[in-house]
Image (spheres, rainbow, N blue to C red):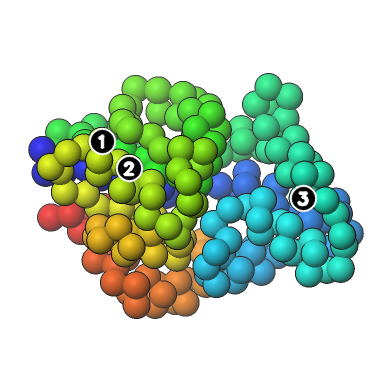
């Protein structure tokens, strides 16, 4: 084994433009009456500290002058996203990897996930989109004391994979900072549809990214 490849989930393994990003737009609209753009959301994401979509919604709603309780915002967000029994916007997610990619990677690497999702939300999507793949360990937001950009999740995975080198693959500046803090090489993913590609690429490189790719499907080229 060459080591452990740790993947962020949203924007890396899964295209979340029509799920999480759409849920943010609808949640902000519900509380403020305003419709924000995808570019506006990406601008906030690039500032760092807003990998968590609940925190992002809360900040935007308060910025628009609406004093909604955090719990109500989260409840509304979750109802839209999960629906009744996982039939909400979560179903619009698309698996990004082409068939065979992870099977090839798994011959040389252990595969792991460190996501800002709850483990339950990670599981639902993995079971639906990639039931045949093994990611182990999977570390979600309730498994760590400090969320990204803290290094907690990566450090936890390193502890569970003793003696293994690791690489973290993520699409948010907080992922890059998390890897940096854990002293693990980072590969940034900046999708072709990202409205702020140049800005995010620059941020990743400044954070010491080993490479920046436009999709997880290009990862074999940069792993060598
Ligand atoms: Mg992500």
**Considering the numbered disc 3 on the image, is that residue within a helix, a strand or a loop?**
helix
Q: Which residue is mark 2?
A: 156
**Considering the numbered disc 1 on the image, is that residue within a helix, a strand or a loop?**
helix
Q: Which residue is mark 3?
A: 70
Label 3 CB, ligand 1: below 8 Å? no
The image position of residue 30, as x and y in percent, is: 85, 51
State left or right for residue 183 relative to residue 64: left
Displayed quadrant of residue 139: top left
In the picture, the quarter occupied by the N terminus is: top left
The image position of residue 216, as x and y in percent, is: 34, 50
The image position of residue 47, as x and y in percent, is: 55, 72
Q: Which residue is mark 1?
A: 160
Q: Residue at x 59, y 71 (%)?
A: 43
Q: Residues within 10 Å of mark 1 (few under 14, many from 20)?
A: few
Please give the label number shown on residue 29. none
Whichever of labels 3 and 2 marks the residue nearer the N terminus, that label is: 3
Label 1 CB, ligand 1: below 8 Å? no
Tag 1 and tag 2, C-beta contact below 8 Å: yes
State left or right for residue 55 relative to residue 151: right
Whichever of labels 3 and 1 marks the residue nearer the N terminus, that label is: 3
Q: Is residue 94 visible?
A: no
**Considering the numbered disc 2 on the image, is that residue within a helix, a strand or a loop?**
helix
Q: Residues within 10 Å of mark 2 (few under 14, many from 20)?
A: some
């Amino acid at each position: 084994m060459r080591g452990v490849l740790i993947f962020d989930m949203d924007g890396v393994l899964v295209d979340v433009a029509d799920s999480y990003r759409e849920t943010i737009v609808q949640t902000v609209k519900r509380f403020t009456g305003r419709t924000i753009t995808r570019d506006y959301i990406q601008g906030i994401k690039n500032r760092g500290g807003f990998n968590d979509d609940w925190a992002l919604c809360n900040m935007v709603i308060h910025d628009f002058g609406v004093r909604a309780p955090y719990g109500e915002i989260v409840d509304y967000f979750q109802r839209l996203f999960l629906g009744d029994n996982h039939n909400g916007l979560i179903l619009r997610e698309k698996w990004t990897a082409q068939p065979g990619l992870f099977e090839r990677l798994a011959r040389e690497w252990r595969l792991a996930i460190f996501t800002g999702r709850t483990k339950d939300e990670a599981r639902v999507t993995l079971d639906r989109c990639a039931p045949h793949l093994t990611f182990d360990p999977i570390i979600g937001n309730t498994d760590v004391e400090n969320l990204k950009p803290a290094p907690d999740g990566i450090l936890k995975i390193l502890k569970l994979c003793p003696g293994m080198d690791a690489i973290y693959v993520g699409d948010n500046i907080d992922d890059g900072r998390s890897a940096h803090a854990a002293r693990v090489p980072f590969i940034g993913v900046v999708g072709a549809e990202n409205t702020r590609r140049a800005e995010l690429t620059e941020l990743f490189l400044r954070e010491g990214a080993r490479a920046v790719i436009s999709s997880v499907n290009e990862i074999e080229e940069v792993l060598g």
